[in-house]
Image (cartoon, helix red, strand yellow):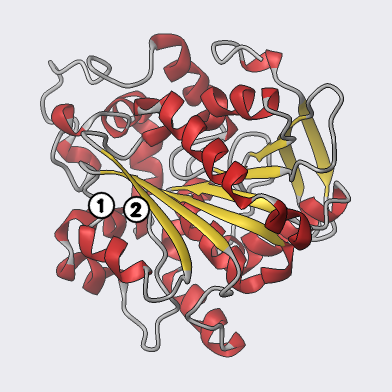
Amino acid sequence: MNPTDPQTFNHRTAQISTGRLYHFIDQIPRNYSPTRPPIICLHGFPDSWFGWRHQIGPWCRQGFRVIVPDMLGYGETDMPHDSSAYSTKNICNDISALLDFLAIPKAVVIGHDWGSYTAGRFALWHPDRLIALVMLSIPYVPPKEQYTSIEEIARLYPPYGYQMYFASESSTSEVEENLVPFLGVVFRTPEKAFPWSKIDELITNKKINFTDDCLLNECELQFYVSRFQRGMRGPLSYYRTTKTRFEEEKEAQLPANLLPNLPVLFMYGTKDATCPPASVQNAHKFISQLNTVALEDVGHWVMLEAQDRVASEVLRFLSSLGSSQNSRM
């Protein structure tokens, strides 16, 4: 497994029971022992299985089977046109079906960004499939009792203003037409960030080289560009599910609290504007076994900005589970 070469990973595709075709990495250690729980990693926006390239190897070398799907709408995984297909309930059902396909009854679920939100909801929709939960950058929030529109969310917390733009249909073609500058701006450290809420704010000054100071090198950037050649409708559709998610969770009467015996690790960068400190503290109300790790001077892209630390902290967390993880398998 060479993080600079996507082809050195073990690629698979599967038609799962929900009817979706999923592409995923399935990295199995030599002399794999089922006493080690399998790990499934869920990426966020605008990412890919490739976002976990620096962690797959270290975890696999420590004996863990690591499964990393391209999420629905990304890469070589199916891209439904209807935005409702991207509701968290549907995505969680897909992840459960992928585990079924692989004959894995329970797993450690790790998520970043939208993948973190989805991982937290997986613990509500499919609590019986979890050994432990790791959330990166986006803290757990419980299902809402009352509907809050994305416009209201952006008003209450202005750093989330970009979500209102992504939820608009116009963002699809605008992002597609400006893919390189868009990725060059999104994948940045906080110190090098450009303030923006709409794509036209990124391209008003054509003299700016948006790939300067990008966290991705030229080869990595081009790989991401190739992954989004099918279009951005699928990835952006996650932001268009606010009402659908609320209605599905209300109908199912999902609980606010995670299971009291579920070990949970939350890791975040202290300079990540999408992770308000109050939200981190609030998560403790709903998670009995919550461990938090603050990555000082790190922004949103923790798997890139703190590659080794993320890998080692997860290994430390899993080793601390001891015999309790075997009882959950």
- Give the residue at x 40% y 81%: 144
Label 1 belongs to which residue? Answer: 162
Instruction: Report whether 303 appears left or right of 248.
Output: left
Q: Amino acid at mark 1?
A: Tyr
Instruction: Report whether 103 appears left or right of 82.
Output: right
The percent coordinates of residue 184 (x first, y second) are 30, 25
- Give the residue at x 63% y 39%: 70
Label 2 belongs to which residue? Answer: 166
Residue 58 has which mark?
none
Q: Amino acid at mark 2?
A: Phe
Question: Between residues 195 and 313, which one lies in front from this camera angle?
Answer: 313
Numbered marks: total: 2
Instruction: Report whether 266 appears left or right of 126.
Output: left
Which quarter of the rendered picture does the N terminus lie within?
Answer: top right
The percent coordinates of residue 87 (x first, y second) are 56, 66
Instruction: Report whether 232 appears left or right of 90.
Output: left
CB within 8 Å, label 1 to label 2: yes
Q: SS class of the residue under badge 1? A: helix
Q: Dot 2: within a 10 Å radius of its alpha carbon, few (fewer than 14), some, or many (20 or more) residues?
A: many
The percent coordinates of residue 82 (x first, y second) are 58, 61
Q: Look at the picture and state if 312 lies above or below 122.
A: above
Q: Look at the picture and state if 142 lies above or below 81.
A: below
Question: Residue 76 lies in what quarter of the image?
Answer: top right
Q: CA separation, marks 1 and 2?
A: 6 Å
